[in-house]
Amino acid sequence: MAEMKQDMYGAVGRIGNKTYYQRLGKTIGRTITKPKNPKTENQSLQRVLMKTVIDTYTHLKVICNHTFEDYDNAFECMNKFKRVNMKYLREHADALLNSGQGLDRFYQFAPIEGGKWTPFAAIISEGHLPQIAVGIDAEGGHKAYVSTPGPTYADFATAWNLQRGDLLTFVTVQKREGKYEVRFARLVLDPRYADGSGAPMTTEIVNAQGEFPCPNKKNELNFSTFEFADDHFNFVLGRGGDVVAAGIIVSRENESGNWLRSNCQLVLNEAGFGPDLCSLAKAVEYSYKTPKIDIESELYLDNADANE
């Protein structure tokens, strides 16, 4: 990769054996290289991993283009998403192989030419705020859940070491009528009365009738299900469906006006994929005969730099 001199300023696209694009006001050129043997199993594996990361970022872009702490713009966040997730996928695959296990239990992937997107256990945010653990009940209606000792804002904050005013972004991928839909909802841990004054943190987040008694005006309550049962909240977003992936991102604005984030990696509900469940081993096997991917794309060529 090299920054172009004056005669190539503004160039975009392929010229000869180079491809040009614009980054942060600069013209960047890359020499186009093609694998000597693109039909090897290793090439297929690398391409399956890259396709998995790119496709998932595309579907989660609206949220993941600003969820990495200290990364100031969408382009930097996109590259951060790609780097950390490629690193995760490679390291997990290597760990499985080095332990004598196969890749037939590593989900969720799709063949290179697969037309249907499905999510994997993507890292969707990174930061220094407390992390919230999310689960999915595979046998109880495929709902996501988060544990708390009680139904109030104070209970939630205490359970996860949060504070008043923290913003929770609920993220799910739900299978509905055979399609996978990304959904988001936002809940601010700052209950407010109708006149805008602060309600006590001992207020229930949601009551038995499914109503939010003291909602913050910044909430985006895109829930089809949000209910407290025993020691946890169950949640499903949007128009419903089986939750196959879920996570919660914590955000907090500091005194300087910068946003802090929590770490969040999607948890998968493998049972929810049904016949779409596909291991890395199977995705590579299906891709081996006819691997095709745009190796001239910036995302693929950046693959050479797997380190942070």
Image (tube, helix red, strand yellow):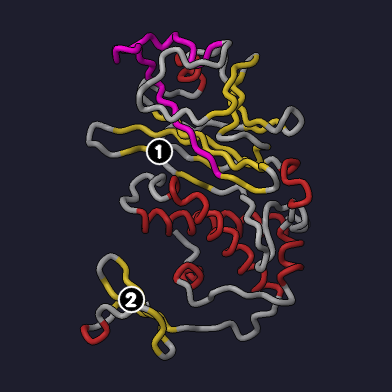
The answer to whether one can see residue 119 in this image is yes
For the record, the magenta segment spans 182-207
Residue closest to the eye, 194 or 13: 194
- Which residue sits at x=61%, y=69%? 47
Disc number at residue 261?
Answer: 1
Q: Is mark 1 on a helix, strand or loop?
A: strand
- Residue 281 image offset from top left, x and y in percent: 75, 61
Numbered label attached to residue 71:
none
Of the 4 image quadrants, the one containing the C terminus is bottom left
Disc 2 marks which amino acid?
A: Ile
Q: Where is residue 216 in the image (x, y as percent from the top left)?
A: 37, 21
Q: Is the magenta stretch mostly helix, strand or loop?
A: loop
Q: Going by the image, does 303 lie left or right of 3? A: right
Which of the two marks, 2 or 1, is nearer to us in this view?
Answer: 2
Coordinates of residue 232 in the picture (x, y in percent): 61, 20
In this rendering, is residue 152 above or below 74? above
* Residue 28 badge: 2
Find numbered disc 2 in the image and state the secondary structure of the residue it sits on.
Answer: strand
Answer with left or right where residue 196 lies relative to residue 104.
Answer: left
Left or right: where 121 falls relative to 4: right
Q: Is residue 164 above or below residue 197?
A: below
Look at the picture and state if 264 lies above or below 29.
Answer: above
